Image: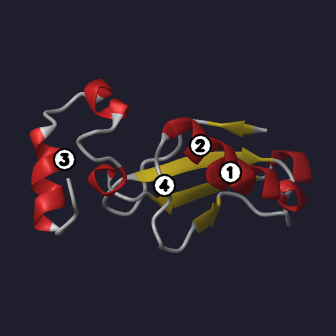
Amino acid sequence: MMKAPCRDRHPPGPVVALDHVGSHMQIGRAFDALFASWPAESGREPADAPVVEEYLNSPRDTSPADLVTHIHAKLTPVWRVLDSASPTISKLSFDTALIRERRELEGLSR
């Protein structure tokens, strides 16, 4: 079982996070959600950075069904994924000038 929202102990910058509840043997489903399903649905991309697993309890004193693992991965900043022609731009809650400015600063086209 997976649930969100998660803890707020994340590295600086945009992240995607979830808590996996259950056996460590089934944690692959959480990674599938983070790296297969969620990016396609959200339009976001994981950054080229390590994924962090935080074990919130121990199998020494917790049943497998009750184990909780907090998983978070840094995301590529939105301005690296979207350009000014993207239909998603109109759905953003902030001024699209930020996208243009950041792309120009990093030498990205459009």
Tell me which label, 4 or 2, sits earlier in the chain. Answer: 2
Q: Mark 1 to mark 2: distance in Å?
A: 7 Å
Q: Are marks 1 and 2 in contact (CB under 8 Å)?
A: yes
Q: Amino acid at mark 1?
A: Ala
Q: Amino acid at mark 4?
A: Glu
Q: Is residue 84 above or below residue 14?
A: above
Tell me which label, 4 or 3, sits earlier in the chain. Answer: 4
Q: Is residue 53 above or below residue 15?
A: below
Q: Are marks 4 and 1 in contact (CB under 8 Å)?
A: no
- Disc 4 is placed on an element classified as loop
- Disc 2 is placed on an element classified as helix
Tell me which label, 4 or 1, sits earlier in the chain. Answer: 1
Tell me: 3 left or right of 42. right
Q: Where residue 61 appears, x then y in whole percent?
A: 84, 60
Q: Residue at x 28, y 47 (%)?
A: 83
Q: Which residue is mark 2?
A: 40
Q: Which residue is mark 4?
A: 45
Tell me which label, 2 or 3, sits earlier in the chain. Answer: 2
Q: Which residue is mark 3?
A: 99
- Residue 105 — which label? none
Q: Which residue is mark 1?
A: 36
